[in-house]
Image: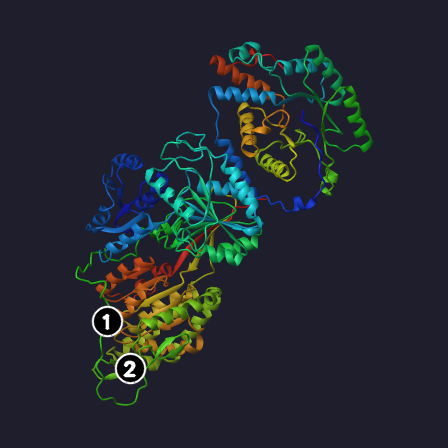
């Protein structure tokens, strides 16, 4: 069902076509839109005029012209269910922090930089045309990072500089001109970058006939920039191209993936196998092979890592403005007194437990495929519904989280390269093992006050869900047919990476399994914090996983939920965090995710009906467990 | 006509390293037609430049001395005198670059040009035009006879059998095709050929000319060809020594465009002298 009121915040010099690509799907699924645009830009005025012409339905599209500071104000309005932000990375981060706890879902589309990878077996002349299209035209969204294989470095530089000499800059509306200007702010940004790059030892080449008056900035090629310099890490502004060499395909992938941004990239190579290897290995939202900048409304366009999580085009673009039927509207759950610096910082001390009925060895942390002692070398007691001691579990801390995330990253490449069938087989084996453990699990649940019948249902459903998820995931990718393109566009679903999950207290076993299964089956590796009140069933499952699953695939850390949540939310190398705890915790998670802009899914403190199919095993889980990549393959010889 | 090529050693490794990505070339071809439009007096200037690069051609089975004479006269006076006067270009010696005919008609062409007092070269197609499937002896004899009759340029049809078996030879100009095929001069093909010319120039310093032929009928097309040359190769190639357009009806369309520029009205075909 549709989301409701959508707030859209746009940067200056945003193309009209991109505005339409974001507004039209929202209107099409039935949402109404409020657009906040910066003052003093002419394009939004056209938008406002169009909005005014929607006579039968006044108010479905509204345009407000105002400064950036109105963004949080817009988001805080009651009834706004989603905020989509397009613009610079730092502003997106600040908005994420400001909006923590306010309720609306935040979609970010940041950083317009793209990448062009030129191998030695490419058609260099065509790649040079691709560079011109990508960086020095009015269609280009931002600057370009250019990676050139060393063997063709000299040739490419020569052709590029020759081609730059023929570029013509001038007023954008003049038909014979290649590129126009984008305002004084953009020019100043480019100027600053060039100066800094030169001071760090780079070679700068500028050419093309440029009118001498501002705000025109000539097409610029920066090379020999040392990789360790700050400029190499910063986003490349328009209209700059920063070129660096690479020796092998492996090095190319390492260099290309070595930035926090992951928007779009193109691979130029006439060898099919090599081109696909690079395309699959690049961590970006869109890959073009032997082309650059192709777009179509039927193909999802978005990014990953710090380029933001919002998509437009294709099915993913529609899902941005939809939410599962029956979900209540988001309301603010903001706690103004939440101290972000102090949340979960201190570990509450635990009193020693009373007399025990029998020796019960404490459960360790399940990290790296085996149970190990926690760094703090202490345990916490778990009490059952009567108040007597059920067992001891490890008290995990920051060091343990770090170890768990490392183990998950180590297991990730192997798990990602497994076929869906292999993953399904492992999940089936786990389901069978759980079934064998049923009496044990039921008794554990009963001790925590769960009725026998309900406990049996819980275990059964867990087994069923493991099997169901295994069967549900098909092979990667479907091919889209795009008008005016000869050749397919592959829509791939790729794993996110390392997924951290904080499990809820309700349905301790079922929720644990319902969250674990979709995450695993889409190729992610997982770090879980089980239910605080009743972690023992989860730990029992870990005993089965120790023998069945590869080491590091699933890591379970017990301990104080708030403290562990803090560690996970602030960790820069976790790609997504699913939090099902308290409202305060949800707010903290949203705030802290701004650090590396990880994807978050919080429950805002509301319990979820895990036993219902829709909420416990619905398509929403599958959608959130993976990300899309569009792979364009124009054909022709 | 530029000096003859010195030539270089045949190095087939140059060819094997070449990669051409067709979808990208097609995109570039589309793009070049949309950008760089030329208007008003600049368009008139570019059209006159295009006229000076035309190889005015007649290659029909029923060519006789009379239509050759008409063609040669048109080559000497491609644009009507009063139109040129209005553009102040009547004393710049605007003629087409050459006249291109079958070998049997070279005599007639030379005679007609001498009578008109014009020194533009006569080009002849030769070597079994258009298929090239005749004996080497007769092909060489054709060239010799055409040159004897007064032709100073020869459009040679290469032996496709040799090409398909990898045996190449060099030349001063490269031409897109005979002009008698089903698909002749298209922009994607031209882009690849022009890039090859530029690479050859960078490697050896020798400038090879380019001649698209066949299917170029509109003045707008001729402007696109000129801007393609300018973009890919540069201004030095926009001269009759290095660039020719093989065309017959193109001249009429260019003349009509110039008529429109000068008078503001569209001409009928009978308003302007036939070629």
Apparent side of residue A68 relative to residue A139 in the rendered image (left or right):
left
Specify the subunit that label 1 lies on. A
Count of numbered marks: 2
Do callouts 2 and 1 point to residues on the same chain? yes
| Residue A558 position (above or below residue B219) | below
Instruction: Tell me which label, 2 or 1, sits earlier in the chain.
Output: 1
Residue A448 in percent (x, y) is at 25, 79
Residue A565 in percent (x, y) is at 28, 67
Q: Which residue is mark 1?
A: A346
Going by the picture, which residue comes out furthest to the left? A337
- The picture quadrant where one finds residue A397 is bottom left
Apparent side of residue A486 relative to residue A516 in the rendered image (left or right):
right
Specify the subunit that label 2 lies on. A
| Residue A637 position (above or below residue B64) | below
Element on which disc 2 rests: strand
Apparent side of residue B176 relative to residue A576 in the rendered image (left or right):
right
Q: Quadrant of the C terminus of chain A?
A: top right
Going by the picture, which residue comes out furthest to the bottom? A358
- The picture quadrant where one finds residue A409 is bottom left
Q: Which residue is mark 2?
A: A392
């Amino acid at each position: 069902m549709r989301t409701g009121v959508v707030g859209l915040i746009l940067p200056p010099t945003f193309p009209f076509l991109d505005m339409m690509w974001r507004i039209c799907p929202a209107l099409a699924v039935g949402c109404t839109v409020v657009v906040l645009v910066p003052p003093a830009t002419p394009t939004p005025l056209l938008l406002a005029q169009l909005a005014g012409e929607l006579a039968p339905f006044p108010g479905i599209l509204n345009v407000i012209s105002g400064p950036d500071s109105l963004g949080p104000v817009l988001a805080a309005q009651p009834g706004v269910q989603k905020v989509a932000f397009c613009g610079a990375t730092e502003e997106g981060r600040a908005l994420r922090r400001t909006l923590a706890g306010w309720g609306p879902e935040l979609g970010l589309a940041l950083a317009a930089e793209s990448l062009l990878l030129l191998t030695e077996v490419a058609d260099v002349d065509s790649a040079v045309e691709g560079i011109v299209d990508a960086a020095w035209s009015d269609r280009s969204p931002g600057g370009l990072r250019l990676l050139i294989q060393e063997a063709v470095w000299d040739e490419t530089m020569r052709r590029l500089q020759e081609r730059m000499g023929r570029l013509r800059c001038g007023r954008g509306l003049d038909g014979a001109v290649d590129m126009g200007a984008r305002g004084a702010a953009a020019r100043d940004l480019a100027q600053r970058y060039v100066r800094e790059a030169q001071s760090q030892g780079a070679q700068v080449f500028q050419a093309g006939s440029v009118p001498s008056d501002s705000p025109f900035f000539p097409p610029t090629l920066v090379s020999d920039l040392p990789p360790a310099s700050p400029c190499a890490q910063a986003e490349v502004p328009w209209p700059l191209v920063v070129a660096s060499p690479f020796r092998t395909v492996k090095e190319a992938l390492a260099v290309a993936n070595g930035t926090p941004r992951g928007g779009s990239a193109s691979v130029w190579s006439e060898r099919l196998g090599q081109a696909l290897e690079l395309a699959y290995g690049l961590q970006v939202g869109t890959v073009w092979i032997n082309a650059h900048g192709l777009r179509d409304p039927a193909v999802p366009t978005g990014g990953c890592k710090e380029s933001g999580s919002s998509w437009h085009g294709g099915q993913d673009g529609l899902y941005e403005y939809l939410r599962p039927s029956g979900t209540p509207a988001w309301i603010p759950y903001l706690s103004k007194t939440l101290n972000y610096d102090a949340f979960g910082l201190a570990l509450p001390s635990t009193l020693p437990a009373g007399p025990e009925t029998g020796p019960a060895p404490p459960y360790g942390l399940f990290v790296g495929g085996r149970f190990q002692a926690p760094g703090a070398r202490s345990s916490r007691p778990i009490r059952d519904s009567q108040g007597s001691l059920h067992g001891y579990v490890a008290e995990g801390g920051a060091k343990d989280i770090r170890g768990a995330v490392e183990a998950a990253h180590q297991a990730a490449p192997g798990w990602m390269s497994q076929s869906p069938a292999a993953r399904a087989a492992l999940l089936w084996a786990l389901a069978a093992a759980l079934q064998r453990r049923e009496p044990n699990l039921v008794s554990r649940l009963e001790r925590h006050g769960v009725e026998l019948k309900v406990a049996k249902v819980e275990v059964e459903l867990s087994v069923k869900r493991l099997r169901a998820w295994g069967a549900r995931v098909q092979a990667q990718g479907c091919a889209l047919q795009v008008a005016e393109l000869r050749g397919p566009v592959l829509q791939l679903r790729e794993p996110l990476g390392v997924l951290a999950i904080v499990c809820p207290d309700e349905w301790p076993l079922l929720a644990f399994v319902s969250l674990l299964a979709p995450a695993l089956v889409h190729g992610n590796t997982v770090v879980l914090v089980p239910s605080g009140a009743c972690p023992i069933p989860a730990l029992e499952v870990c005993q089965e996983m120790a023998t069945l699953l590869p080491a590091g695939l699933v890591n379970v850390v017990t301990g104080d939920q708030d403290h562990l949540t803090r560690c996970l939310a602030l960790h820069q190398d976790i790609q997504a965090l699913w939090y099902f705890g308290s409202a305060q915790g949800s707010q903290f998670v949203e705030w802290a995710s701004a650090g590396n802009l990880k994807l978050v899914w919080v429950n805002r403190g509301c319990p979820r009906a895990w036993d219902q199919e829709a909420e416990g095993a619905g398509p929403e889980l599958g959608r959130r467990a993976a990300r899309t990549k569009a792979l364009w393959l124009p054909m022709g010889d | 006509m530029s000096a003859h090529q010195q030539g270089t050693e045949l190095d087939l490794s140059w060819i094997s390293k070449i990669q051409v990505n067709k979808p990208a070339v097609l995109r570039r071809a589309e793009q070049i037609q949309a950008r760089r439009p030329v208007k008003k007096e600049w368009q008139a200037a570019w059209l006159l430049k295009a006229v000076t690069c035309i190889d005015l051609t007649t290659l029909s089975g029923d060519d006789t001395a009379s239509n050759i004479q008409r063609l040669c006269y048109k080559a000497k006076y491609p644009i009507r005198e009063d139109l040129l006067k209005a553009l102040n270009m009547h004393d710049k010696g605007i003629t087409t670059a050459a006249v291109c005919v079958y070998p049997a008609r070279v005599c007639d062409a030379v005679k007609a040009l001498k009578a008109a007092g014009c020194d533009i070269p006569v080009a002849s197609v030769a070597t079994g035009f258009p298929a090239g499937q005749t004996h080497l002896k007769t092909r060489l004899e054709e060239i010799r006879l055409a040159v004897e009759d007064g032709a100073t340029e020869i459009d040679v049809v290469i032996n496709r059998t040799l090409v398909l078996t990898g045996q190449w030879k060099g030349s001063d100009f490269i031409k897109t095709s005979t002009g008698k095929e089903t698909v002749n001069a298209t922009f994607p093909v031209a882009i690849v050929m022009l890039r090859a010319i530029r690479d050859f120039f960078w490697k050896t310093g020798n400038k090879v000319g380019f001649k698209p032929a066949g299917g170029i009928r509109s003045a707008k097309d001729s402007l696109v060809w000129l801007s393609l040359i300018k973009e890919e190769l540069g201004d030095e190639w926009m001269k009759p020594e290095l660039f020719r357009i093989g065309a017959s009806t193109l001249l009429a369309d260019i003349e009509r465009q110039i008529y429109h520029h000068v008078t503001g009205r569209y001409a009928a075909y009978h308003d302007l002298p036939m070629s």
